[in-house]
Each structure stands twice: as C-alpha cells, then as structure tokens.
Image (spheres, grey):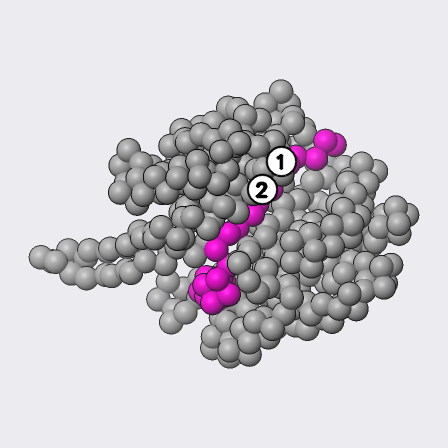
C-alpha cells in the first residue's frame, strides 16, 4: 500500500524517540513492500522558536493531507513562562481540535517481565489490561475562560461544556472497542455534583441501551474510580470518560506498569488522519543523552498501523517484537532497575532485529 505519514518530533527527547520509530516504519515497509512516504513538521517549543507559533499553518496543512501522524513530545522549561504569549501545549490542543481528534485511546497493560517495576503489589497489578477512551476536544479545556477583577479580587472562570453529539460519538468508540474485547464498559463521571456529568450519564446510558445492549455496562464516580485504579484495576476493561477526568485518570493509571516509557496512545476522529504518540512528556532532563526509552513511541507506531493504516498484521509484528525484546531482558535506563541498560538507538535496533527474526 501507499501511505503518507507525517512525523512531528517536537521537543526534548522527541527527536530521539521518533528517529527510532522512523526506522521501524522503514523496516516494516521493506518487509511488506509498502510505500510509506514520510514528511516532517514542527510543533511545540521548537515551532515557537522558529515561527513564533506552536502549530504553524504549514505543519497543520501537511497533517491534514496525511494518512497518519506520529508525534514525539512537546514542551520544556525553556517555554514554561506563564506570562508567555503562547506555550508549546497550545499546539497540541490546536491540532486535536483542528483535525477533530475527539477520542484518545490509551492502553494500560503491564508487561509480564516488568511486573516488579510497578509500585503496586504483584497480586494487584498482574493481569491488568485496561483501555481508556478519553474525550479529547470538549469539556473544560475547550470551554470559554476569563480572568477578571471583582471588588479587588482576581476571579478566574473556566467553562465545562459538552453537547449530546460529542458524548455520543466518543461513547460509540468505547463501546465498539469493548465489543471486541470482553464486552465490559465503564463510564466515569461526577453526576452527583456536575450538570455536565448528569448529561454525560444520560446520553451514555441511552447510546449503550439502544446500540450496544449486549455490553456489561456500569457507571463509576471519578473519585471512586481514582481509588479503584489502585486497589482493584483488574476489574476494568474499557473505560470511557470526559476530557478533564480522562486526563487525570490516565496519568494515574500510567504508573501501574512501572514506566511511562512503555505506554502509547492514539487520538482518533471520524475522518482524516489519527495522531499517535507516547504518553510521556518531553523529558528535557535527559534530552540529548541517548538514554530515553523509545518503546512507547514504537508501540504508538503499532497503533498507527492498526487504526489508521488498517494493517493489523504489521501492528502485531511490532508488538510481538517489543515483547520479545523485553522478554530477552533488554532495558533502557528507566526500566533497568539497577541492571545493565542500553541506549535509545540500541533499543530501537533490538526491536528491528526482533521484527526481522519474527518475520
């Protein structure tokens, strides 16, 4: 097949980890005789430095015509001034909004050889396999905001807003995913306090009862869910929630496997390209040292093959290669736990060798 893939390395360790994923894409193309046409763009802090804009028009237009987008990371202390005209994260929010990437898929599945790396006990973490589906373009992050003065006091306002269709479409994504797994779906809200959550609960229940009546469906309040993720994470399969709650819960869940360096994510819309990225940040403290873990980005590449390019065999090959590399005991510094570690590029090469061995 032919596919146009845009690479957005971004800031910090982004260029290092995307470089390894790019090698994997090339190897998959070679093995399966695909024609992957790669282009690069700027986003985040590096784009601010070059263009004064965290998402230049040129990058956005290139992404609009792509089949898939692979992102490294954005941000860093260089651009952390709260009084700055713009920030790197604005570019990330804008690309999600402009491309209507409303559903964020974040799998949480500890690797069997790294169970001891988790901060939780083995009997709690073993067997965990959760897929979070987070609504990504609505809620409080995209509502109106205001900072004003009243009677000598500063007052800040943020609007949390959801519409029926925004809830329906993300619940359908989660429900479809649940139907392909263990047919269990959990919706998380704060309906005992928030009117927005009461709408979320009504609409979610309606979608499931009308279109996915075979699902085992339940509802959990967000504060209870935060506790359940630590005490009984195995009880959950697919979890769907709004933008704010999803942001917090997925970051909490990301520590369960023991390293952010192993977890990918996908941001999908109804049409157009998907955006794939590791869930970790730009890690500026280790940028340029060649010790970052590229596996989350490589696994995000597997998600790209699965969802946007519809190449499940290629996706499975990458996932099996990563699993084989970890089974063999190869570790970057973040998961070495005092044992010998290898570099970013060495880990990428191990994955490519495993891909060829399996293929």
| Residue occupying the point 88% across, 46% down | 358
User: 286 and 160: which one is in front?
Assistant: 160
- Residue 96 is situated, as x and y percent measured from the top left of the image, at 49, 61
In this orientation, does residue 333 appear?
yes
- Which numbered marker is on residue 349? none
- Residue 69 is situated, as x and y percent measured from the top left of the image, at 62, 64
- Residue 128 is situated, as x and y percent measured from the top left of the image, at 61, 30
Determine whether, in the image, residue 270 is placed left or right of residue 329. left
Residue interval drawn in magenta: 89-113
Q: Farthest top residue?
A: 123
On the image, numbered disc 1 is attached to which residue? 181
- Residue 192 is situated, as x and y percent measured from the top left of the image, at 28, 33
Which quadrant of the figure has residue 108?
A: top right
Q: Farthest right residue?
A: 357
Q: Are marks 1 and 2 in contact (CB under 8 Å)?
A: yes
| Residue occupying the point 85% across, 64% down | 33
Q: Farthest left residue?
A: 151
Q: Is residue 60 above or below residue 289?
A: below
On the image, numbered disc 2 is attached to which residue? 177
Which SS class for mark 1?
A: loop
Which quadrant of the figure has residue 15?
A: bottom right
What crowding class fits label 2: few (fewer than 14 Cα within 10 Å), some (14-19), or many (20 or more)? some
In this orientation, does residue 346 appear?
no
């Amino acid at each position: 097949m032919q596919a146009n893939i845009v690479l957005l390395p971004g800031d910090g360790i982004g260029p290092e980890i995307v470089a390894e994923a790019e090698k994997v894409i090339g190897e998959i193309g070679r093995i399966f005789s695909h024609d992957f046409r790669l282009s690069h763009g700027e986003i985040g802090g590096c784009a601010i430095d070059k263009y004064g804009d965290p998402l230049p028009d040129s990058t956005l237009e290139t992404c609009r015509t792509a089949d898939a987008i692979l992102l490294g990371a954005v941000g860093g202390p260089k651009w952390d001034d709260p009084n700055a005209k713009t920030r790197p994260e604005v570019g990330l929010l804008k690309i999600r909004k402009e491309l209507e990437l409303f559903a964020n898929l974040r799998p949480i599945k500890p690797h069997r050889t790294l169970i001891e790396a988790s901060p939780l006990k083995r009997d709690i973490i073993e067997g965990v396999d959760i897929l979070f589906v987070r609504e990504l373009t609505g809620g409080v992050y995209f509502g109106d905001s205001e900072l004003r003065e009243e009677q000598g006091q500063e007052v800040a306002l943020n609007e949390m807003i959801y519409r029926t269709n925004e809830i329906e479409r993300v619940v359908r994504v989660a429900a479809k995913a649940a139907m392909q797994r263990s047919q269990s779906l959990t919706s998380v809200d704060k309906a005992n306090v928030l009117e927005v959550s009461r709408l979320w609960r009504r609409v979610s229940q309606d979608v499931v009862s009308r279109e996915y009546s075979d699902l085992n469906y339940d509802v959990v309040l967000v504060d209870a869910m935060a506790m359940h993720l630590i005490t009984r994470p195995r009880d959950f399969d697919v979890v769907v929630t709004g933008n704010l709650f999803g942001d917090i819960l997925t970051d909490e869940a990301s520590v369960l496997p023991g390293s952010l360096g192993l977890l990918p994510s996908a941001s999908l819309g109804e049409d157009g390209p998907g955006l794939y990225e590791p869930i970790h940040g730009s890690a500026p403290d280790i940028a340029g040292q060649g010790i970052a873990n590229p596996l989350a980005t490589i696994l995000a590449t597997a998600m790209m093959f699965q969802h946007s390019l519809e190449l499940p065999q290629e996706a499975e090959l990458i996932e099996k290669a990563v699993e084989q590399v970890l089974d063999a005991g190869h570790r970057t510094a973040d998961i070495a736990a005092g044992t010998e570690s290898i570099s970013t590029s060495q880990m990428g090469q191990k994955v490519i060798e495993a891909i060829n061995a399996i293929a």
